[in-house]
Amino acid sequence: MSFLTDRLRTELDCRQLAEHYGVRFRKRSTGWWLAHCFNSESHRRGDRNPSLSISAQGYKCFSANCAISGDAFTMIAHFEGLSLREDFEEILKIASAKANLDYSTLRLEEKQRHTSRPVYKNPTQWKRYKKREERERRRRKTDQLKYGALSPASNPLTQPEPKPKAPSEDLRQTIYRFMVSTLDPNTPPPLNDHFPDPFQDAFSIDPRHKRLEIMQNIWDIVAPLDLSDQAVKWLKSRGINPDIAHAYGCRDWSSAADQLRELLSLYSVEELEQTGLVRTQQNKQKIWTGLRALQREDWAQGLGVPVVHPGWPVAPIAWRWRLFNPFKTRDGKSFKAIAQYSGEPHMPSLPLGMTPPTSSALKDLSRWPSLSSTPEEPRYAVVLCEGEPDWLSVAEVSSHIESDLYIVPVGLIAMSHGYPPHMSGILEGAERIVCVMDRGNTNKKYALTGGEVVVEQVRGTLLYQAMMNNEPFEHAFNRIENKIVSSLQKDDFDVNDLHKHGQLQPLIEQLFGDLL
């Protein structure tokens, strides 16, 4: 067992991983959780009576027809459609991302540990060395079983009671280290000749990249389109004004399907893969759901929701496809919004609404700072929310609030993606950052709910940026503490539900209060 795999097995909790992949649980106890088996092919009628037990370290199905078992790596391989033998490197990268660890850093550390081992030419000496390593590993495992995550040296049960300390900066430093630890260090390297970015974020892209050309051509076709009756019906069912959604760039591509198919036929498969519209995996070609909708597949019909980078508000850089009729697969995985594949070179996951597409109606509706005609830098605040309906709900509410403060809605999809550290620039200039989302499930790694983890990630991102700017910690902590305001809702009543019941606008006005 290598250092890398051992570390990832320690960090990953198979139960949380299964929840992320949509596994349905029936019963949860202290160690093992009972769930419906995701290996549906081995169950004649689907696993009606849950037979899959999942612990933090692994899982096992006790059905005689199935009997699958494994750990976090085999679970990732199953859900990502990868081969455990042939694609193990890719599995390790995915596992590192899910554990919020930098894969390249882990590889480097493993290499350093390997080179630091003594070289024994004598086989007897090598065996003695391996035995010492094995004894040390068993000792650590025994300590974990006996004392939990603590070793005897740090276990408070074996130590004298510490003397009480006077209140100091120690607590704040601890909070700071926790928040910085939630940051994802995987920031993509900037490309050459990048276009200007109004927020000076680390992410940039070459304007000659094929992705931008294809996306701009798609936008030229879909921008003039009106929303279809089906799209209007879906938006109204979520309490969203179709005019607002249209002004923010949402489009149903169905009426221009022939034009879009003709456009995409001009490009090679390699160019479409760079754009993230097509993906080749295990010699199989996967087509993004938005393109499958163009092929008249009923299940894939939906609304295209744009994702635009602040430095290139000419056209969306990517799309999310929101299905009109969400569904669940046999293994319990829910499909309602499907993002594009990342493409090559790898594009980071961008939040919704960092900046909307250029539109004449948009100036009156959202009044984005980059579209302002005033020479001085305008006042603006940011509302962080979750998915597409939440983002559009906040956008509609912000368009009705009369103030010289620009309210910018940003949809994060943050419970699964987190806030991208490379998009910290927009947070720096905001007068207030309001986090409105549901609480989500408890993250056992941090003992916080998903919504609370997102708030701490945002706080940590700003503190990290302040540290890089050599700002005194005490000053930065107080400034950021006063800037961030959160309102986390119960799980069965999200932001879009607040909007449908007319409660979102009063809440937003209350959270901004003195700034409006």
Image: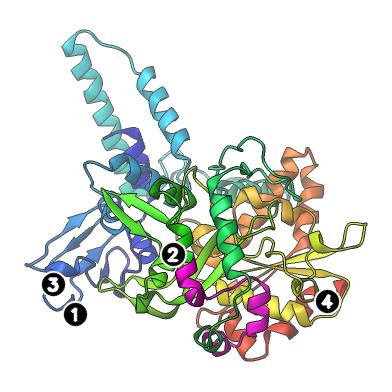
* Residue 510: mark: none
**Percent coordinates x, y for residue 416 in the rendering:** 48, 61
The residue pinned by badge 2 equals: 261
> Which three-letter amino acid code belongs to the residue tagged 4?
Gly
> Which three-letter amino acid code belongs to the residue tagged 2?
Arg
Identified at 68% across, 53% down, the residue is 312
The residue pinned by badge 1 equals: 48
Gap between marks 1 and 3, in whole Å?
9 Å
> Which three-letter amino acid code belongs to the residue tagged 3?
His
* Residue 43: mark: 3
- Colour scheme shown: rainbow
On-image quarter of the N terminus: top left
User: Residue at the left extreme?
Assistant: 64
Is tag 3's residue or tag 4's residue first in the polypeptide sequence? 3
Is tag 4's residue or tag 2's residue first in the polypeptide sequence? 2
Is tag 1's residue or tag 3's residue first in the polypeptide sequence? 3
Q: Tell me whether the residue at label 1 lies in contact with that at label 4, contact meaning CB atoms closer than 8 angstroms.
A: no
Can residue 161 be seen here? The reply is no
Gap between marks 3 and 4, in whole Å?
56 Å
Q: Residues within 10 Å of mark 1 (few under 14, many from 20)?
A: few
Q: Nearer the viewer, residue 512 or 350?
A: 350
Is tag 2's residue or tag 1's residue first in the polypeptide sequence? 1
Q: Nearer the viewer, residue 266 or 231?
A: 266
Q: Secondary structure at mark 4?
A: helix
Q: Nearer the viewer, residue 263 or 230?
A: 263
> Which three-letter amino acid code belongs to the residue tagged 1?
Arg
The residue pinned by badge 4 equals: 513
